[in-house]
Image: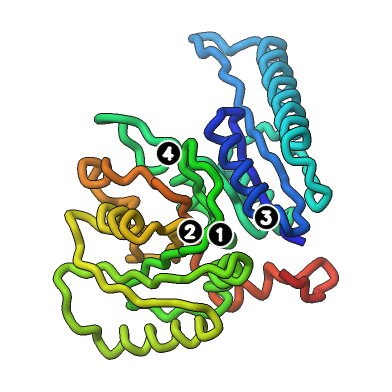
Amino acid sequence: MKNILLPTDFSENAWNAACYAIELFANEACTFYVLNTYTPHIAHSRFMAAALEGNMLEDTAKEISESGLAKVISRIKAQFNNPRHSFHAISSFSMLVDEVKETIEDKQIDLVVTGTKGASGLEEVFMGSNTVRIIKSVNNCPVLAVPESFPFVRPNEIAFATDFNRFYTESELEPLLDMSRTFGAVIRIVHVQQGIHALSELQKFNLDMLRKYLKNVEHYVHTVSELNSVSKTLEVFSNELDIHLLAMLNYQHSYMEKITREPVVKKMAFHTQIPLLVIPELGMCNKKSKNQNEEGLSVSQ
């Protein structure tokens, strides 16, 4: 059984991400944790706010949060009514990223699914600030970012963006392999270069190992020349090959890190048009600890 975390702020953007996740795992047994955090605003003055006023504000925010979660779960059950799925509400007086990290540990979360929303003009923010903060802070669980208003499409074509400069462990690639096996999807390994040139010996070795991990999955390798930025290049590649899901491993100097650091003007055209699966740098040790229950027994994924 998969444990899926769905952070929500009760927006249609968050609702769309929840719907995508529910349809994505329609044929699998899943427990969904629907999370809302609240931090009521307390007016500041040169005098300390009255404790009673603070408590009233917190109680009101708590009621709004719990009521909103109940409505979301009721709406989900009315629309989908999947007997394979169960839902639990988590309302917390906390900062979103802190609560996401804590819930991942407490509930042994396998995937976080969050909505993304773009802005326009000078307000453009890559994937939305909350999503970026989650991706940058969560180092032990994959994060699936679903674009605003993106309808569910069975992911038959998955792109995996890499520069082959890092050795991947099989455990790190498991979320990608799991998606491919579940949907019979083709994996297209895409390597963005600044000018096409031969791979180094290290890159060749890492590519060979990657292909060994993917030996039972239909896959292809694509090398493309960078267009202005990594994000723009991946957007064009995804559009041209009708990619349904883009995956990246997030580590120091990775494509994911480059994209989140690109100047605003360069990434304005990149609105995460398709769902983005961000895989953390797990390594063997972290994967082992995540897959053990309290008695120390291995838990199947």
Residue appearing at x 77%, y 61% in the figure? 1
User: In x, y percent, where is residue 13?
Assistant: 53, 33
Between disc 1 and disc 3, the foreground one is 3
Mark 3 residue crowding within 10 angstroms, few (<14) / some (14–19) / many (20+): some
Give, as a three-letter code, the residue at label 2. Val
**Residue 278 marker:** 2
> Label 2's element?
strand
Q: Is residue 149 above or below residue 163?
A: above
> Label 1's element?
loop
112 lies left or right of 1? left
User: In x, y percent, where is residue 285?
Assistant: 60, 76
Labels 1 & 2 near each other (Cβ < 8 A): yes
Labels 4 & 3 near each other (Cβ < 8 A): no
Give, as a three-letter code, the residue at label 4. Gly
Q: Is residue 295 above or below residue 29?
A: below
Label 1 sits on residue:
142
Label 4 sits on residue:
128
Labels 4 & 2 near each other (Cβ < 8 A): no
Label 3 sits on residue:
25
Towards the viewer: 150 or 270: 150
Mark 2 residue crowding within 10 angstroms, few (<14) / some (14–19) / many (20+): many
Residue appearing at x 51%, y 79% in the figure? 169
User: In x, y percent, where is residue 188?
Assistant: 40, 70
Nearer-N-terminus badge (1/3): 3
Give the residue at the far left of this rendering.
195
